[in-house]
Image (cartoon, helix red, strand yellow):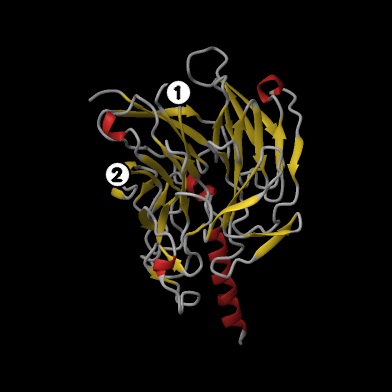
Amino acid sequence: MGFAMRFFKYVGVCAIFVIMSNAPIEAAAAGPPEPRVPDGFSIETFYDDVPGARALARGDDGTIYVSTREVGSIYALSDEDGDGTPDRRRVLAQELNQPTGIAWHDGDLYVAEIDHIWRYPDIAKHLDAPQRESVRDDLPDATHHGWRYIAFGPDGKLYVAIGAPCNICEPGDFVRDGRSLQFGSITRMNPDGSEWEVYARGIRNSVGFTWDDEGELWFTDNGRDWLGDNLPPGELNHASGPGEHFGYPYCHGGTVPDPEFGKGRDCDEFVAPAQALGPHVAPLGVKFYTGNQFPAAMRGQLFIAEHGSWNRSKRIGYRVTRVRLDDDSQGVEYAPFITGWLDGERVRGRPVDLLVQPDGSMLVSDDAQGRIYRVRYTGE
C-alpha cells in the first residue's frame, strides 16, 4: 500500500474515532440550544454549570445528584434558599473512571465507575466531606460500552447495565464469585453487592431503565452500527420477569436478523421491543411520567432522552420523545416531546437523562451544554 493510500486510510480512521467520541465540544461550539416544547408547556434552565451532566438522582431532601462520563466528576445541587431551584453546586468526587451510573437509596448515594461501584453513606449529612466505601470492585474493565447505568428497582435490588464489549459480537461471559455472568445484560445485586445475578440478556447497551406500577422493568437499548442509515431501530423494551432474552446479537428491533450472527436464528425466539425507536437515535434515559402536573393523558406515558446519532449520513435524535402504551404494554404512539437541540445538521445539545420531580415537573440533563432543564405544564 502506497504512502498516499495509507495516509488517507489513517485520516478516515481518525475521523471515525472523532465521530464516535460523542463530541460535546462540537455541540458547545454550535451555540446554546433553544429547546421547544408543546403548547401549554414551558422549559427553563434549572442549573447551567454542570459540565458533562449525565444521569440524575434525587435525595429525599431535594438535593439533585448528577453524574458525568468523560468529565469524571459527581455533583450535588442544593436549593439552600428554598425557592425550588438549586443555588449551590458541590463537587463530591473527581477523576473517577467514567462515573455514568448514579442512584440514591435509603439515604446513601451509589456511584458506578466502569469497574467499581461505590456507596457514599448518609450523603445528605456529608456533602462537604463525603466518605465512600466499596460495594463491588470487580465489574468488567472493558471500556467499549463500559459506562454503567444503575438504578434501584422496587425489589430493593441495585440494577447494573453491563454493555456488550463491541459493536457486534457474541458478547461472552466474565467470571465473578466463581460464576459466569454475561456481557450484554442487565444484572442486579443486593445493596451490599451480594447475590449478583443476570436479570435480562441479549441487550447491546442499555443506558436507561425504569419500572412500571406493576414492578416490571422497562429499558432502552442502543442498536448496532454499520447497517446503514435506517437500520436497526433503537429499542424500548419491557421485561415481564427475569431470564428473558432480547435478541442481541442475533436479531435487532424484533424484526432485523443480523447479517452475520442472525443466520439460522428466528427473531421470534426473542422478546421484541414494546416500541421500535428511530434508527441510531441513541436512546438513553427513560422514565414513566408519574406526576400530576402534566395533562392527564400523559400520565403513565414513557419519556425517552434521545442522545443523537453519529452513525448516520443525516443526524437524527437530539430530542426527548414520548411513547403511549396500550393495555398490552405495546407502544401505540411514538412522538417528539422536546426538540431544538438539533438545528439542521448543527448539534446544539444532547439530552441524556430524565427525572420527574415531586411537584410534577420534569428535569432533563444535557451533557454537551453542561446544563439541566426543567419542563413544566403551565396551561391547557
Mark 1: secondary structure: loop
Percent position of residue 377, x then y: 32, 26
Percent position of residue 125, x then y: 69, 19
Is 20 drawn above or below residue 325 in the view shown? Answer: below
178 sits to left or right of 23: right
Q: Which mark is residue 358?
A: 1
Is tag 2's residue or tag 1's residue first in the polypeptide sequence?
2
Cα–Cα gap, marks 2 and 1: 26 Å
Q: Amino acid at mark 2?
A: Asp
Percent position of residue 64, x then y: 56, 27
Is 240 drawn above or below residue 155 in the view shown? Answer: below
Percent position of residue 372, x then y: 49, 33
Q: Quadrant of residue 378?
A: top left
> Is residue 113 visible to us here?
yes
Q: Nearer the viewer, residue 92 or 114?
A: 114
Q: Amino acid at mark 1?
A: Pro
Q: Residue furthest top?
A: 81
Q: Nearer the viewer, residue 31 or 270?
A: 270
The residue beneath circle 2 is 327
Residue depicted at 65% across the width and 32% down the height: 109
Q: Residue furthest bottom?
A: 1
Mark 2 touching mark 1, by CB under 8 A? no
Residue depicted at 61% across the width and 86% down the height: 2
Residue depicted at 48% across the width and 70% down the height: 250
